[in-house]
Amino acid sequence: MTEAYDAEVMSRSQIKKTGEGGRIGAERKKTAPEKRRMKAVGGGKMAPAKDYKPRKDIGTQRQASTRVQQPEQERGSARERQLAAAKEERRKAAQARIAAKKAGQKPEASKTTSKAAEKTATQLLAKKKAAAKPAEAKPRRKWEHEGGGGMTRQERDKARNKEKTAAAQKTKKSSGEILSQMRKEYESGGGKWSNAVAVRMRAKAKAAAKASGN
């Protein structure tokens, strides 16, 4: 004997079917054709990225108090205290004015010195500096093969090192070029070029070329 439920009742029911692996709700994992995250697998080919690992807290209901900031004071207490203090201050000022009027005196006005007034005016008239505009972030380079398709980490490293080597080759000088420059500088300084000087300078030129990676 099997139990049958009305479809309308089932649609209104709040009871949810337990998902796979003890989940509270149904599993919403996308199938391979639905996945949009792609990963380079080498040779300009792309494949769907791997699935995320299942969470350790599957099947447990998280309380709102553990993930939402709870109020530390009574709701509205700080604002109510501020309003009450402002109201009391206004009440005292009104009572002082009434008492002064009954005694036939003029209510005391707040005394402002010329120095204080000048300082306030300076602050009001001061030109406010515009907020400095933050520098725009450099766009991240997208490494791709010539025929299209992303690169793996090893392929990116190889392409990056190739570019660095090509850039270094442009600024690199051979030992002959360095020796020629050293001779010009030596002779322009009043020195006389000789075999002994040439041997010494040639050794320095070779060392300089070796240090530059040539």
Image: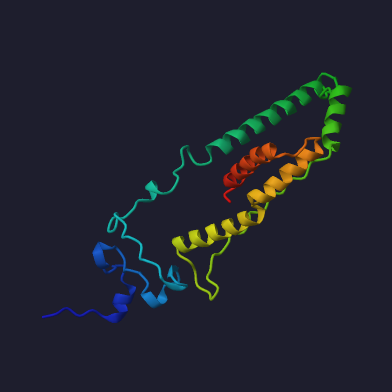
Among the 4 quarters of the image, the one containing residue 55 = bottom left
Task: Please tell me which residue lies in front, 44 or 54.
Answer: 44
On the rendered structure, is 34 left or right of 212?
A: left
Vertical position of residue 100 compared to residue 157: above or below: above
Residue 133 picture location, percent across and down: 72, 49
Query: Quick check: can you spot residue 132?
Result: no
Among the 4 quarters of the image, the one containing residue 114 = top right
Task: Please tell me which residue lies in front, 194 or 35.
Answer: 194
Q: Residue placed at 20% from the left, 80% from the top?
A: 4
Among the 4 quarters of the image, the one containing residue 190 = top right
Q: In which quadrant will I find the N terminus? A: bottom left
Q: How is the image coloured?
A: rainbow
Q: Residue placed at 48% from the left, 38% from the top?
A: 74
Vertical position of residue 148 compared to residue 162: above or below: below
Residue 179 picture location, percent across and down: 68, 45
Residue 113 picture location, percent across and down: 86, 22
Q: Residue furthest front?
A: 195
